[in-house]
Amino acid sequence: MDNQRPVAYATLLTADSYLPGVLTVHASMVVAGCRYPLVVMATPSLSVEARAALKGRGIIVRDVETLRPDDGKHTLDAADVRFGDTWTKLRAFELVEYERVVLIDADMILRRPMDELFDFPLEDGWIAAAHVCACNPRKLQHYPTDWVPENCAHNAVQGPHGAPPSPSAPNAPRPHRQLNSGTVVLQPSLDALGAIAHLIAASPLVPTFAFPDQDVLSHHYAGRWAALPWKYNALKTLRTVHRNVWSDDEVRCVHYIFSDKPWHVPRGRAGEYEEVNGWWWDVYEGLCRDMAESDPEGLALMEKYVARA
C-alpha cells in the first residue's frame, strides 16, 4: 500500500471530556504501526486548548457542523444521553478530500494495524461494518426486545477466524441486519451525506432509533453493507459473552462500549474487564510520559477527565 494515498481514519470529538479517548486511540495507532493519518472531526463546542493538544500530536483537525434531528423529534433513554452527539459522526461522508475513510469511535484502541481495511472490497454506494452484539448482557430494559442471545449474529461465527453471517441472509433475525458503527469503512460522498441528512430530518422512523447513527446506517444501507469480522470492532463484552469467537491474538481494534469508559475507571476497579481496560491504560500511560515532555499543558487538560483513584 502507498502511504500517500488519499485515505484516512476518522473520529468525532465534540467535547473536551473525550480528549483522553481520542488521544489514546491515536497513540495506539502509532504503537500499532498504522500507516495512515487520523482526522478528528471537531464541532464548534470543542475548546481551543483541546484543538491545540490534538494538533500537537500531529492529528488532523477538520471542523464540522453538528448534525442531529430537529429538537423534540428524537428522545434518548436517560442511560444513553451520551449518544446525543453521535449523529454527527455521519459527517465522515463529507470528508471528500479522501477516497476512503475508516470511521472509528473515540472509545477504542488498536491492538494491531488494520490498514488493510482501506483495500477491503467495497461496491460503489456500500459501506462495511461489523454486526451488533444483540445479547444485551446487562439486561437493559430500554434495548430492543429482539436483542436476545438467540438472535445475535456472533453466535453464527465459527471461532475467531470464522466469517460473519451475511446481513442480507433471508429469514435471519433482525439483529443480523444491524451493524455496530464503532468501525465503518466508507467512501465519502456529498450525495450520500445529503441522503442521510434528509433521512434524519424527515424519516418517520427517526423517533424509533435507539442508537442514533448506528440505526441510521443500518436502515439507510439495508442490503448495501458488507460484514466485517468481529476483530475490527471487538466489543469488550464479546470476550466474556462470545468466548468461542474471541481471541486476544486476533483483535485489531477494541471497543469499550457502555458508559464506563476506561478513563472513568481507575486501574484495579474494572472487575471482569480489568485486563481489557488494562490494555487501554498501558497505551494511555505511555502517552502521558510522552506528553509530559512535549505538551504539559495538553497533558494537564487531558488528565482533568481521567479517574486516577
Image: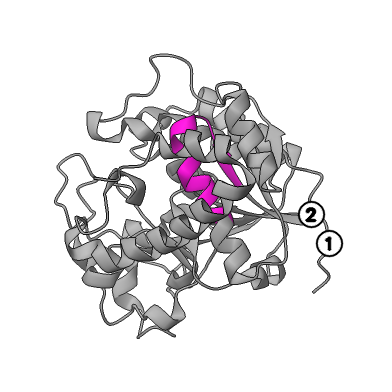
| Residues at marks 2 and 1, CA–CA distance in whole angstroms | 8 Å
Q: Is residue 115 left or right of residue 155?
A: right
Q: Relative to the observer, which residue lies in front, 186 or 241?
A: 241
Q: In the depicted view, which residue is nearer to us: 119 or 191?
A: 119
Is 13 covered by the magenta stretch?
Answer: yes
Mark 1 = which residue? 5
- Residue 224 at least partly seen: no
Q: Is residue 264 left or right of residue 295?
A: left
By secondary structure, the bulk of the magenta-drawn segment is best described as helix
Could you classify mark 1 by the number of other residues whose Cα lies within 10 Å: few (under 14), some (14-19), or many (20 or more)? few
| Mark carried by residue 99 | 2
**What label does residue 191 carry, if any?**
none
Q: Quadrant of residue 31?
A: bottom right
Location of residue 99 in the rendering, given as x and y in whole percent from the top left corner: 79, 54
Q: Against 241, is 290 above or below?
A: above
Q: Quadrant of the C terminus?
A: top left
How far across and down, in percent of the image, does residue 289 sit? 51, 55
- The amino acid sitting under disc 1 is Arg
Query: Does the magenta portion include 33?
Result: no
Residues tagged 2 and 1 counted as in contact (Cβ below 8 A) = yes
Select label 2 or label 1 by which is in front.
1
What is the magenta range?
A: 11-26
